[in-house]
Amino acid sequence: MEAISQAVASFTKAQNILNMLTYLNLAAYLWPQPANMNIKGGESFDFLIVGGGTAGCIVASNLAQMNVSVLVIEAGCQPTIDTEIAGLFPLSKNRNFDWNFTTVEDSTKKYHRGGVTEVEQGKVLGGSSILNYMIYGTGNCKDYKDWANITNDSSWTYDSIFPLIKRTEKVIDRRILQSSDVAYHGTQGKIALKKYHSSTNDGFYESYKEMGYKVLNDINVNNPLGFTPAYFTISDSIRQSTAYGFIRPEKDNPNLKVMYRSLVTKVLFDDNKRAIGVEVLTKDRKTITLYANKEVIVTAGPFKSPQLLMLSGIGPQEHLESNEIEVISNVPVGQNLQDHPTNIIIHKLGVVQPVSPRDPHQFPVNVMDGRVAINKCQNYADYQVLSGVMTNSTLFLEICLFTFTFTNEVCARILEQTANHQVHFITHRLLYPESRGEVRLNSTNPEDSPVIDPKYYTNENDLERHAEYIEHYNKIVDTSYYKRLNASFVDPKLESCDGLEVGSKAYWKCYTIGMSTTLHDYVGTCAMGSVVDSKLRVNGVKNLRVADSSVIPKIIGSSVQGAVMVIAQKVSDLLQKEYGL
Ligand SMILES: Cc1cc2nc3c(=O)[nH]c(=O)nc-3n(C[C@H](O)[C@H](O)[C@H](O)COP(=O)(O)OP(=O)(O)OC[C@H]3O[C@@H](n4cnc5c(N)ncnc54)[C@H](O)[C@@H]3O)c2cc1C
């Protein structure tokens, strides 16, 4: 426990130093200057963008280049300098640019601080692309075929959206650029993508080959299954947030204005249910009204977009009426919440390693990305494994305690068993969960957090499948490389699994729940096909769209930020066409 106290103390100290840096706002020159002082209530803009997050920055930048006036209203601040340094991402948690949400009490989070999931979400220009883990993926053909089927709109198939992926990406990885895999990526976009190649991982790739999996230069629609170095939204050690990639180059564009620390509290409608503007609680706590000549675009993320719609009268009738909100459109806002249930697995490697110093400019682990299908004829994965070697127990504790918020006891028990050894740190995700959670209003106060209930594993199949897949992956401990390393699975000795034989089916089920966590891939709460149509227009009203992670109707088979960027590019094209811009 002494190691835990030390880790907590050094983590807190580092965060305090960074918080002091935040006040100096050293990176302010990179971003649009705050328009707060110049904007008075009653003003109008062609487009109002609610939330300058991952999607909002792309939409705002695209529209501003089309010669229309665009106002981004962002609840958070300008990005601080430390958020740009890729390796500092674990320190972003619980800072003032995180909404600091928590889920309802959750029986799958018994071994987490507070018995809940701490849900991080960016409250800053760039949104969650400022504090995410920078792993990049766009899903596979099946994902977009599912979206096209749900919306009955073939413009969502992979072939149709590939130009949007290509337009966003700027692959800078030399091995991809020199291979035929480059055909599946963009090289001229605004989000630079890099892979970390490291000989440390060679033995693991040997193990994967021995298990019958492909080791690939790249995972893409041509080669959807196998293991490869993960893509990161990092270039020259700098996080490639959408604020950095899309807004920074437009910072002096007179068409683009940004209000910071300003919370949109309501979308306003005329008698014909046409969205005409928004009500805003400004930084100095004045309530003002701003108008949209053309449309209001909501890009406030998977929790705040549904909350704002419900506060504005768009949502499930019964829930709105119970909150005494006048119903403008009765649609299932807040339902259909999805995330990839994620599990942590630790393998102790028989390699003793002196603590290696950390380089804040590098992602702290060389991550391998694996996509595995149980049925080898299937062309999409059932589970994804993101893993890498940790050579530093301080880093392990930081990730265990703060990133994944396991209890001190669980982290200490793992540490005891792995002291001074390298560990293979594995995150194992169920890619296609069937459970559906929900987001509800806590109250009619827009400053309150919404109620978040992910309902992980409430569909029995999810638990059965995830436990089976974890057992399936864990067979890696029988490979020659693992034997040579004298490597072994670390049992976290969860009280709820007492008496179960390690490796038995019952054990894996118990383990799956006990060690479950999240990588924050929340989607689906204003889903296409039910809340919005395939052109992202909110059903039952006019001139209002939602265009962020919340419109994803079915979660994709990879990390989600690439798909969020696709959605933002798509809505920009739709607006350009519809308004002849
Ligand atoms: C900690 C973390 C790690 C992650 N890691 C990865 C990863 O490695 N790879 C990956 O692909 N995905 C990852 N994700 C998920 C991915 O980052 C998100 O899915 C994506 O960024 C969501 O984009 P968005 O535009 O929907 O919302 P956001 O980017 O969250 O943007 C919403 C914006 O709206 C603002 N806002 C909200 N309400 C209001 C309001 N009422 N008024 C004004 N402004 C408002 C917010 O402050 C925010 O800036 C991670 C997410 C988190 C939180």
Image (spheres, rainbow, N blue to C red):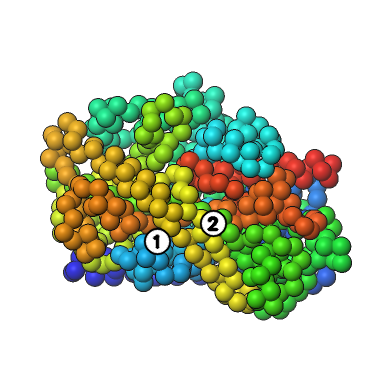
Task: Spot the residue most to the front.
Answer: 460
**Circles 1 and 2: CB atoms closer than 8 Å:** no
Q: Which residue is mark 2?
A: 337
Q: Quadrant of residue 294?
A: bottom right
Task: Name the residue rendered at 54%, 56% in the picture.
Answer: 337
Task: Name the residue rendered at 52%, 43% in the picture.
Answer: 556
N-term mark: 1 or 2:
1
- Image position of 472 (left or right of 87): left
Q: Residues within 10 Å of mark 1 (few under 14, many from 20)?
A: many
Residue 91 - label: 1
Ligand 1 within 8 Å of disc 1? The answer is no
As shown in the figure, which amino acid type bears the numbered disc 2? Leu
Label 2, secondary structure: give it: loop
The quarter in which the N terminus is drawn is bottom left
420 vs 251, nearest the viewer:
420
- Image position of 288 (left or right of 239): right
Label 1, secondary structure: give it: helix
Q: Is residue 389 above or below residue 280?
A: above
Residue 514 - label: none
